[in-house]
Image (tube, grey):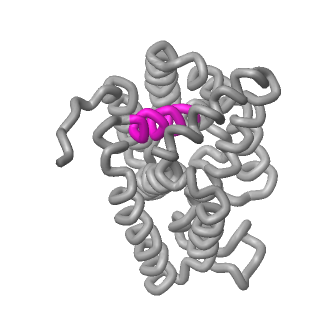
Amino acid sequence: MLTTPKLKFTHIYIPGIIVIGLGLFIDSLYVAQFTDHGQNITNALVLAVFLWILWKSSKVTRFLMLAGVPIAFVGEVTLSIGLGMYTYRLENVPHYVPLGHAIVYASIYYISKEPWVRQRQQSIIKILYGIMFLYSLLWLIFAQDVFGFLCMVIAMLLFRRFPDTKLFFLMMFFMVVYLELIGTYYGCWVWPPIWFDVFTWIPSANPPSGIGAAYFLFDASCLVAYKIFNLQKWQRLRRFQSRRYAQ
């Protein structure tokens, strides 16, 4: 019989979830009607939450967050400004975005560590897996979101290749759904109607339903950075993760 353990990490991920919604609203087209400083306010709020989570996190998570910021910045500049995959409201890369990537990463990590979640891991995976497929399928049918559906298929293939990542990345998938729906609704950024605004044979919704699959690359890049700078600790971490996911 399952017990109901106390949630241990709400002080880390709840501020992260809140600042995403609040910060995107402040940087929205609506707020821009009243002030030109919305993005700067969001930058300050996100930085404050980033520092809070950084302070409360473990050494490993702290390193991954700090490594994630420049990785996310390079990725954002390349994909948004360089390749035009999506465009931010002011046609820049807001300072809060790379910090936000790190906040999302840490938030999902600590949600997935909650004893309540660990106890119900397999059930949560099955439920989220089904919702993920249905969500992307509906966007494909009703919004012609071929790009988003393809991203979802890639995510499913990666789950088969790396089965111990399912819980983390399914939760990440829906965190990205949350921030993408809010961000595009408020006009903080926009996705073109076709992939990279070039490939007419790959139509896309705004936002693409399965774009959370891109976080596989972000996660892999952060872990590679950790491995390079902390080889022995990396080996211990992988052994620990193997034992944890085997439970």
Quadrant into which the C terminus falls: top left
Residue in view at x 79 percent, y 57 percent: 83
Give the percent coordinates (x, y) of residue 19: 39, 33
What secondary structure prevails in the magenta region?
helix
Which quadrant of the figure has residue 123?
Answer: bottom left
Residue farthest to the top, as pictured: 55
Left or right: 216, with 230 as reference point? left
Left or right: 22, with 189 as reference point? left
For this rendering, which residue is in front, 31 or 16? 16
Residue in view at x 52 percent, y 64 percent: 207
Residue in view at x 54 percent, y 72 percent: 205
Residue 46 lies in the magenta stretch: no
Residue 103 lies in the magenta stretch: yes
Which quadrant of the figure has residue 202?
Answer: bottom right
Give the percent coordinates (x, y) of residue 242: 59, 41
Give the percent coordinates (x, y) of residue 61: 57, 25
State the extent of the magenta-drawn residues as a range.
Answer: 102-113
- Numbered marks: total: 0
Q: Is residue 143 above or below residue 22?
A: below
Which quadrant of the figure has residue 200?
Answer: bottom right
- Residue 49 visible, this orientation: yes
For this rendering, which residue is in front, 28 or 151? 151
Residue in view at x 37 percent, y 43 percent: 118
- Residue 26 visible, this orientation: no
Q: Is residue 15 above or below residue 126?
A: above
Give the percent coordinates (x, y) of residue 5: 22, 33
